[in-house]
């Protein structure tokens, strides 16, 4: 085996780990069969722990790559500074199509139009069900979008699938309140806020699992912390379903991001002796906080502070990686 040290870098931390670079010819298929694992696994509308970590990483890069922008607010007659905004797109009438169809027909069409009209480059989207059973979408971008234009574009897309005509039959007008956009300028830790909002598991535990026309009883995919009942001498569930509103299961992809964010989020490279030495020196001097695990070491530091704490070689390597990710794909 030939183990080498690698670094995985995000805007908020550096992970050092070792990996065998020699090809592994071992056949692991029998282990997968023994565990009853297949190539496809249903998420049941829940974001896994690994998915949450990927969302957090993509959001960190989205904020890192976005610059501060000043926008005039006519309501208060003043300018404000912001980095990213938060968009919500919903259906004005009862959902008539599957989640997978709407993702392709509505969301993909909106993202394509937005990239052409407003030059949206980096974005992250998340789909989840509402209390009324309709699917809706959350999108994080770093480009200013006028709310009137956003509403008109989304309504025009909905018209092709009779959601506006059905809304008009009930409310007798053609302009539903089905969009929302606001900048995140008053949130202290924007990354943690967005990761918590976009990474939540479709209201967490409150999901009614469904498949086709059959309805299964309420299932809890995660083990809940229980308590010991001294009378029954059993560990009982401490969660109460009283007054809880349940949301339906969603189908298809739960979230996604732009190609650049996807590429940049995979910032991993072979560490040189100089980079390993600089990391150890910075940690020993207390410039960065290091947390040691069995298979890796995590150094908590921001990308913008790497030069000041003596990690310029790692900073330059990350910048080169970002520039390569932004290079156009050859046709």
Image (cartoon, grey):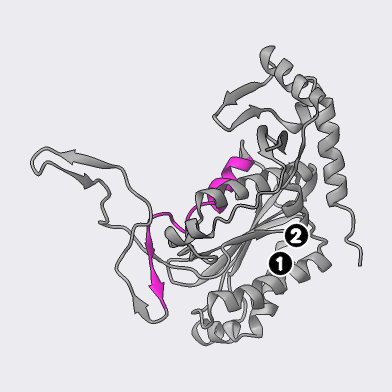
Which corner quadrant of the image does residue 206 belong to? Answer: bottom left
How far apart are the alpha carbons under marks 1 and 2?
7 Å
Q: Is residue 98 left or right of residue 116?
A: left
Residue drawn at x 76%, y 52% is 263
Q: Is residue 184 above or below residue 104?
A: above
Q: Is residue 232 above or below residue 102?
A: above
Asked whether 93 falls inside the magenta stretch, the response is: no
At label 2, counting other C-alpha atoms closer than 10 Å, the crowd grade (few under 14, some 14-19, many 20 or more) is some
Q: Which structural element holds mark 2?
A: loop
Residue receiving disc 1: 150
Quadrant for the C terminus, please: bottom right
Residue receiving disc 2: 145
Farthest residue toward the right?
Answer: 330
Tell me if I can see residue 57 in this picture: yes
Q: Which structural element holds mark 1?
A: helix
- Residue 141: x and y in percent read 71, 55
At label 1, counting other C-alpha atoms closer than 10 Å, the crowd grade (few under 14, some 14-19, many 20 or more) is some
Magenta stretch bounds: 190-211
* Observer-nearest of 68 and 31: 31
Residue drawn at x 83%, y 51% is 325
Residue drawn at x 78%, y 49% is 72
Looking at the image, do the residues carrying marks 1 and 2 touch, with CB atoms under 8 Å apart? Answer: yes
* Observer-nearest of 4 and 286: 4
Asked whether 204 falls inside the magenta stretch, the response is: yes
Which corner quadrant of the image does residue 147 belong to? Answer: bottom right
Tell me which label, 1 or 2, sits earlier in the chain: 2
């Amino acid at each position: 085996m030939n183990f080498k040290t690698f670094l995985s870098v995000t805007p908020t931390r550096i992970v050092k780990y070792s990996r065998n670079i020699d090809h592994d010819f071992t056949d692991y298929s029998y282990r997968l069969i023994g565990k009853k694992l297949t190539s496809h696994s249903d998420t049941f509308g829940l974001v896994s722990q690994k998915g949450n970590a990927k969302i957090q990483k993509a959001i960190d890069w989205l904020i890192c790559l976005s610059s501060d922008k000043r926008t005039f607010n006519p309501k208060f007659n003043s300018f404000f500074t912001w980095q990213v905004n938060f968009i919500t797109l919903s259906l004005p009438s009862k959902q008539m199509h599957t989640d997978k169809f709407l993702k392709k027909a509505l969301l993909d069409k909106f993202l394509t139009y937005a990239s052409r009209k407003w030059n949206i480059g980096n974005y992250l989207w998340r789909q989840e069900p509402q209390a009324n059973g309709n699917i809706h979408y959350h999108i994080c971008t770093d480009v200013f979008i006028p709310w009137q234009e956003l509403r008109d574009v989304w309504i025009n897309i909905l018209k092709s699938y009779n959601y506006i005509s059905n809304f008009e039959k009930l409310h007798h007008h053609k302009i539903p309140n089905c969009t929302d956009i606001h900048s995140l300028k008053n949130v202290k830790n924007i990354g943690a806020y967005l990761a918590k909002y976009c990474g939540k598991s479709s209201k967490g535990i409150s999901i009614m699992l469904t498949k086709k026309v059959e309805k299964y009883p309420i299932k809890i995919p995660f083990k809940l912390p229980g308590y010991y009942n001294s009378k029954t001498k059993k560990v009982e569930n401490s969660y109460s379903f009283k007054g809880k509103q349940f949301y339906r299961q969603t189908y298809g992809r739960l979230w996604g991001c732009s190609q650049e964010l996807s590429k940049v989020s995979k910032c991993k490279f072979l560490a040189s002796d100089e980079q390993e030495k600089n990391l150890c020196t910075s940690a020993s001097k207390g410039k960065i906080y290091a947390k040691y695990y069995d298979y890796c070491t995590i150094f908590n530091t921001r990308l913008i502070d790497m030069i000041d704490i003596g990690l310029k070689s790692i900073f330059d390597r990350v910048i080169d990686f970002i520039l390569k990710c932004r290079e156009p794909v050859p046709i």
